[in-house]
Amino acid sequence: MLAITIRFALYANLMVLFGWPLFALYGTRDKARGLSPRSLASLILLAVFLSVAGMLAMTASMSGVAIIDVDRGSTKAMVFETPMGVAWQVRMAALAAIAVLAFVRNPAARVAQVAVAGAALASLAWTGHGAAGEATKGLVKLVADIVHLLAAGAWIGALVALGLMVARNASRLKSADFISMHCTLDGFSKAGTVFVALLIVTGSVNTWILVGPAGIGLIGSDQYVQLLALKLALFAAMVGLAAINRFRLTPAFSRDLDAGVVPLEAHRALRRSIAIEAGLAASVLAIVAWLGTLVPPASL
């Protein structure tokens, strides 16, 4: 349970660290704010702590001991002699680079910060089943896993930023605030379509490699397949809510603004929908963290 909790927290942390600043880049730049310096520092420090804890948990699991009994030699071997250790080093270097780039105030530094945060997030592919394959099949799985992580991070990071944006009390917002909110929502709706498409394609590749057609029949007996089915159901619900946001709620928001009406009802509906979507996203991440500790049918 400790390993699953650490994995969940690390996934969520790195996805927000990547997805939120990315959202600030492709959104309306003068209206979609990025992470505040305090929030960025907190996320970096938390990522470092969780990465260290995660490395200790992996070492403990492979050594067959409790996490408090992990010795220095085993940890050193894990860090410097395994692909997971190399990925861990890359992640720690990336987190340090993000902290340095935070002090550089120009657009190029913002782009570089997002790119480095993406590298930190991509390093998680080596902590699960992404790097488990061999030859061409293994490379395809690894690339699909990396793209899947980045697309998920882009979606979830933006979802957190949007959730905080629409959580503001509507009675305290001015007309300009609602216009800004609509522009940001519209920008995310278009980019979100790309993220969903990437998640579907890469998720299908991952499922085919890790489960395969034979594994589908194990849904009644295999825990991995059951959790994967639940994950897919929750993801489908997220896509459904995203579609409602794009094709129904955001246009309703726009119609109210065009008519000179304060979009209070549309605002409440969007706030409710995004909150539910965020809850579903957290559930999906929890399942992903759990799946990473199980053996998929294709490996049996």
Image (spheres, helix red, strand yellow):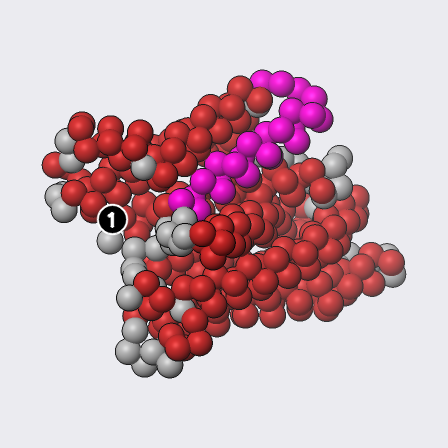
Left-right relation of 129 to 64 = right
Identify which residue is drawn at 24% across, 53% down: 1
Q: Quadrant of residue 21?
A: top right
Residue sitting nearer the eye, 231 or 16: 231
Up-down relation of residue 225 to residue 153 (above or below): below
Q: Quadrant of residue 84?
A: top left
Residue 35 image point, x, y percent: 58, 34
Identify which residue is drawn at 83% across, 63% down: 255
Magenta span: 103-126
Inspect the magenta stretch and tell me whether residue 114 lies in it.
yes
Residue 12 image point, x, y percent: 45, 47
Up-down relation of residue 95 to residue 247 (above or below): above
According to the image, label 1 marks what residue? 2
Whether residue 163 appears in this view of the structure is no
For the stretch drawn in magenta, the main secondary structure is helix
Residue sitting nearer the eye, 191 or 144: 144
Residue 122 image point, x, y percent: 49, 42
